[in-house]
Structures are given as structure tokens and as C-alpha cells.
């Protein structure tokens, strides 16, 4: 299973659509900023899950979700409520408490992907024409995560 991860698109739906055509995912996750961008991807008919970010003012969408794909549980949030611009301690422990296998967040616009104590931690960065996105590949052997350039 191939899952695309977007965050902080801030109106750049075109960049996400270019990535969709290239990657042909089975599911899309959007980590907020901006929920209308995520909703615009519905026309492609690919299952979509999203959370609201700090720029999604007045949204009644959830800010944290923990979907499960195959046997892999994902903790997904924008990150602003966990103060990720200061440190990752709060968000990491929240994901541990949720028993997540993968932690996804955005907000900082800085892409990174690594493991800590057996958990994948990914910030896909800001999705725009010079930005990045995340890719999760689920197989019978587990999960692999990476960050790729939009261009």
C-alpha cells in the first residue's frame, strides 16, 4: 500500500496534483494548512484523510486522528498544538501513548524523516512547487517512510 503525505500546502493544490499523478497512491493524508486544499483532492477518487492546522481558522475538522492501515497505526496531526517548533517531546509522547507505529506532523515546513525507539517520525515539509511530500509504503514486512521533492 502506498500512502502520500502532504502538509502546509497553503493553496498550492497544483503541486499536490502533480505528485498524485506521478505517485498514484492508494490513500492520501493531509496534515493541515489548508483543509480546503485537501478537500480539493477528492475529485481524484483516492481515499483521503485530513486534519486541521493552525491556518484552518473556524474549521470543525479534527486536529488529531489515529487511522490504521493494515496493521500500522498512524498518529497524524498538524503539530501546532504540540509546539513542534520548540521541540518534539510532547508530540512523541502523545504518539507513544496512542501506541502509534508512525508519527506524522507538519507546521514547521521543514521536511524530515527518521526513526526513534522503533517509531517512524515524519514531517513531509511544505507541499509547494519547491517543497516536499512524504511517502509511506506498507508491506507485509512493515512500514517504510521517506520524504521526496515535489519538483
Image (cartoon, rainbow, N blue to C red):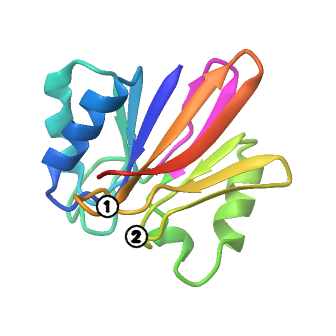
Q: Which residue sits furthest front?
A: 151
Residue, far right: 117
Which residue bears the numbered disc 1?
A: 8
**Label 1's element?**
loop
Q: Position of residue 60 (x, y in %)?
A: 27, 50
Q: Is 42 on the left or on the right of 131, as rendered? A: left
x, y (%) of residue 145? 61, 42
Magenta highlight: main SS: strand
x 53%, y 19%: residue: 1
Left-right relation of 68 to 60: right
Residue name at image x 50 percent, y 39 percent:
135
How far apart marks 2 and 1 lie (CA) works out to: 7 Å
Q: Position of residue 23 (x, y in %)?
A: 36, 29
* Most distant residue in the bottom direction: 86
Magenta residues?
64-76
Res 137 seen here: yes
* Label number found at residue 109: 2
Magenta residue check for 115? no
Write down the quadrant of residue 83 in the picture: bottom right
| Closest to the observer, 150 or 106 | 150
Amino acid at each position: 500500500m502506498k500512502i502520500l503525505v502532504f502538509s502546509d500546502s497553503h493553496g498550492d493544490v497544483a503541486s499536490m496534483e502533480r505528485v498524485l499523478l506521478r505517485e498514484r497512491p492508494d490513500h492520501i493524508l493531509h496534515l493541515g494548512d489548508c483543509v480546503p486544499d485537501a478537500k480539493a483532492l477528492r475529485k481524484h477518487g483516492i481515499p483521503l484523510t485530513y486534519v486541521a492546522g493552525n491556518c484552518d481558522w473556524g474549521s470543525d475538522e479534527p486536529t488529531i486522528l489515529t487511522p490504521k492501515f493494515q496493521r500500522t497505526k498512524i498518529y497524524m496531526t498538524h503539530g501546532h498544538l504540540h509546539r513542534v517548533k520548540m521541540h518534539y517531546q510532547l508530540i512523541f509522547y502523545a504518539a507513544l501513548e496512542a501506541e502509534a507505529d508512525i508519527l506524522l506532523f507538519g507546521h514547521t515546513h521543514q521536511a524530515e524523516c527518521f526513526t526513534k525507539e522503533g517509531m517512524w517520525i515524519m514531517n513531509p515539509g511544505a507541499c509547494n512547487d519547491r517543497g516536499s511530500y512524504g511517502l509511506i509504503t506498507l508491506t507485509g514486512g512493515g512500514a517504510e517512510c521517506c520524504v521526496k521533492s515535489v519538483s
